[in-house]
Amino acid sequence: MKNFPPVRSPFAELKLDDIAIELIQCPFHLQPFCRFHRKDYKSAAMWAGAQMCPASHTKMVHGEGPKVRFEMPYLFLDRHGKRFMDEGCCRMGYLNEFTNKYLAEVDFAESTAAKFFSIVPTNWEEHYDAWKDFSDISIHNAYRNVDPEAWIKGDTLEELAEGMIAYADEEGWAHDYTVEAIVESINRYNELVAAGNGDEDFGKRDEYMVPIEAPCYAVPRGANNIDALVDGLWCDGNFQCLDVDMKPIEGLFAVGNASGPFFGNSNYPMDIEGLSVGRAITTGFATGRYVAGL
C-alpha cells in the first residue's frame, strides 16, 4: 500500500473535529464555495492519515454534450473506423467494457482513444417511436433533447467519412480513420441487413438491424477529454478510514462518494437508479448508527 508523503495543508492548523464540523455545517449547494471545496474532502482526510484506494479506479465514459448523447442501437465505429460491438448494449454506463481496449492501445495516455461514432439514418425518429416501448434507448438528456444540427451529415458515405475525419482531427481524437475503412464498415453492416440472416458479426437483435444509407449522420460519442475516476478512501466495514498500516483512524469516517472501494470493476453502471445518492444515504445511516453506539 502506497503511503502518501506529508503535504503542507493550508488547513494544517485545524483539528480533525474542526474539519468535520465545517463540512457538515456547510449547505450542500454552497459546498463548492466553502473553505473545503468538495474535491478537498479526500485531501483533508489524507492529511489526517487516510489512504486513497490504489488504481485502477472506476472510469466513467459518458462522453460529449447533451446534443449528441444519443443512445440508440445503430452502427458504432471505433477509432479505426471498424465496428466493435453489439450496439444493443449501447447504454453509456457500460461502454467502459467495450472501450478499455482502445485506451490500452495508447497506454492509457489519451482518453480520446475511447471515442467513437454512431452512424445514424435520417429516419431515426421513426425507429425511436417503434423501439421505445421495448428498448432502453434515449434521446433525452435532462430537459434537453439531442440536436441533429450538432451532428455530422453526409449526402454520400464518402462525404460522411470525410466529415468524421475532419471532426476527429479538429477535436484532437486519437484515431487512424480512413475514408475507405469507414465506408467498408458501413457497407458490411448494410450487407448483413440486406441478407436478412441476422447480425452474423456481433449478434444484435433483429429489430435493430436497419439499413443505414446516405444521406445519413455520424454522431460523436465516447469518453470526455476530462476523465472522471470514481473511488475513495480505504475504509473498514464501519466506513472508518484506514491508515497506511490498514488500521482504523480514530474519529475519521468516509461515506458516500468519499468512501471506497465500492465498484467491483471498471464500470459505473448508470442504469442502477440512485447509485450515488442511495450509496450516500445508506452508508451515512450505517456509519451514524455505528458511531452512535460507541
Image: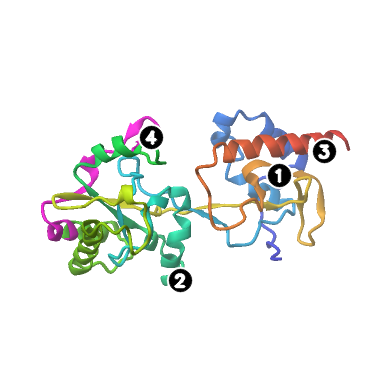
Q: In the shown orientation, is residue 257 left or right of residue 118?
A: right
Q: Amino acid at mark 3?
A: Tyr
Say whether residue 65 is visible.
yes
Give the alpha-carbon distance from disc 1 to disc 3, as whole Å: 13 Å
Which residue occupies 52% across, 48% down?
A: 269
Q: Amino acid at mark 1?
A: Ala
The answer to which of marks 1 and 3 sits earlier in the sequence is 1
Q: Which residue is label 2 attached to? A: 107
Q: Amino acid at mark 2?
A: Asp
Q: Amino acid at mark 4?
A: Asp
- Secondary structure of the residue carrying tag 2 is loop
Tag 2–tag 1 contact (CB < 8 Å):
no
Residue 290 circle label: 3
The answer to which of marks 1 and 4 sits earlier in the sequence is 4
Give the alpha-carbon distance from disc 4 to disc 2, as whole Å: 41 Å
- Coloration mode: rainbow
- Secondary structure of the residue carrying tag 1 is loop
Q: Which residues are magenta?
A: 139-161
